[in-house]
Amino acid sequence: MQTTSILIAGLGGQGVIVAGSVLSCALVLAGSDVKTSCEKGIAQRSSPVLCHVRFGDRVYSPLAVNADYLLLLSPVCAADHYLSPETRIIKCSCRVPYPNMYLLGMLSRLLAPTHAMWARAMESCIPGSFEASLACFRDGSQNS
Amino acid sequence: MLLTGNSAIARGAYEAGVILATGYPGTPASEVVEAAAELGIESQWSANEKVALEVAFGASYGGARAISAMKNAGLNVASDPLLAISYTGVNAGLVIVVADDPGPHSSQNEQDSRHYAMLAKVPMLEPSDSSEALALTVMAYNLSEKYDTPVLLRTTMRVAHSMSIVKQGSRTETKKEVRPDMHKYVLLPYHAKMRHLFVEDRLQRLEAHSENLNSCEFRGKGMGIITSGVCYQYVREAFPEASVMKLNMTYPLSCRQVKAFAAEVKKLYVVEELDPFIENQVRVMGLDPQGKSLFPRTGELNPAIVGSLGSGKKMDLITEHPSLCRGCHYHQVFRALRKTGAAVIGDVGCYTLGALPPHNCLQVQLNMGLSIGCLSGFEKANPAKPAIALIGDSTFIHSGISSIINSRYTGSISTVVILKNGVAAMTGGQPYPGSDSRRGIPQIDLVRLLNALDIVTDMITPDRVEQTIMRHMSLKQMSAIIVDAPCKRPAYLSRG
């Protein structure tokens, strides 16, 4: 299986890294080899945050060069360099309680993990109660 | 199980029976110590990296395995004990993790810390992902004890902070007897002379051993690429059909093994970030690989740059301006500093951001603890110019105390402003020794400490910065102002 590259981009505080963790976890549960790389510039001071997630039979580089998908939480210049004309951009201008989970939901329709796997991933990666995140994720997965 | 490289290193230390983890917060190394704590290993944030390594060595000498983790610049601070421990060797295994930062993403420089392996004459391992980070850490302890050497485990941000799948194993408990040996552990010149002979012989034996750790993957013979660390992953991505010599131990190298690889391939390449560290070792063997003639010495590599043999587009770093948190006390401090008109000789911490807009109020920042000494030198050059040193509390404990003693007792009449937010905030809010009263020991009293040096000291709140600085600068004696400005990030002041 060809390796698929996903880039999640946003600002500190928007849950980019949590989204990356949930996505990675779900893909591992679905049996893929997964590598993830998060970059956050000079620590957490309102800086842009990028999370690369790659999955396939055997993944080498953790960087999502020429990303297949971009989950865009906020426009971030640094993301541009990892994109190609073929990159499919997933974003949403609607107001939802957990935009990062909503976008993951939208993406999930194109990926292998089952709903149960996503739920397990959220339970292990989201501190505290994850039900609200799961509900928002579900809404996203039903978005056309 | 998905783990970051740092967590995998901590897991490896745990499985190898390590009982002590020390370090100083520094991106991208910090999580090694934090993950070690979560696994139940006694973990300490040391005053600075030199102390951290010395404490870890103490455990090793005492017969217990220990690990010390630091960022690139941190190894500079710990280099004094590192070079000495190379000579004494160890009792129980000792591993030093150094995390480099090609980019740089969050460092004052882009140094290639691999040179320390050569300078210190110690073996160095470079994992290329989390699975290797775990395995090489466990192996490092066996290597350390078998060859009587500290071992450097070198990562870069892309290994330290990237996650990959890891298989966890079980823990081996281990403890050695304390064995005093004056000729080994007391580095009087005559003993050092003998130990140097041992060190050179050890290097030769490690060279031979490296053949077990480094492997040749033969595929198409047109291209042969020698590589290590995360660059191995980029090479596999960019040139899946090329033959690759994968180095897990990047120093020392086996001349025999490298030459045997080179003989099998038509064109020889070395792919590495930063300095031609591997390339120059290969050149000394009489080979002529293509390395830095193609690939840049600055910034990170990635599969696109590797795949295009150096001409692909470079990924720009995240360049949007970072800024102080919205409600941070330091905004008020900088507005006040601006009004005083004093030149601000700064240091390393969140307050470094005062150099940027909107404050534009900090002139100098180099390494940890520079500010105080630098100010006293500046004062000699410009006795009439109003200037202050600006340093945070954790940085002050790290390396400000020696400096302030130096300033006081070389006759400086400068004013040092210590910003006390209670944590090492920029690196994620870690405590420092004395920052709080954990372990039942009272918080360090900076006012008393400075008074003991006969330095006029005031502890104030941020709203009194302007008038206090104006008053202190008119005093004709060394003085300090401690600004009590607790970090506003709620998670930081309560973390362990």
Image (cartoon, helix red, strand yellow):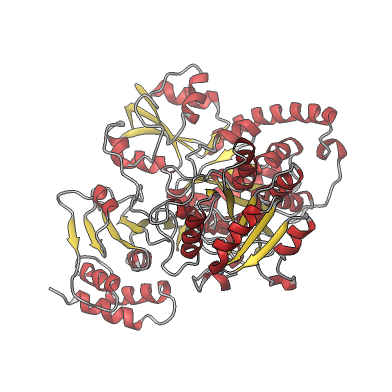
Which residue: 48% across, 54% down? B5
Q: Quadrant of residue B234?
A: top left
**Residue sitting at 35 percent across and 38 percent down?**
B235
Q: Looking at the figure, which quarter contains the N terminus of chain B?
A: bottom left
Residue at 46%, 55% in the rendered image: B354
- Residue B105 seen in the figure: yes
Task: Choose top left, top right, bottom left or bottom right for residue B233.
Answer: top left
Q: Position of residue A62 (x, y in %)?
A: 36, 51
Q: Is residue B82 left or right of residue B113?
A: right
Q: Is B366 displayed left or right of A107 in the figure?
A: right
> As displayed, is residue B72 above or below residue A144?
above
Q: Is residue B165 left or right of residue B139?
A: left
Spot occupied by residue B47 in the image (x, y as percentages of width and height):
67, 55
Please identify the residue farthest to the top as the structure is shown.
B286
Point out the residue furthest to the left here: A144
Q: Quadrant of residue A21?
A: bottom left
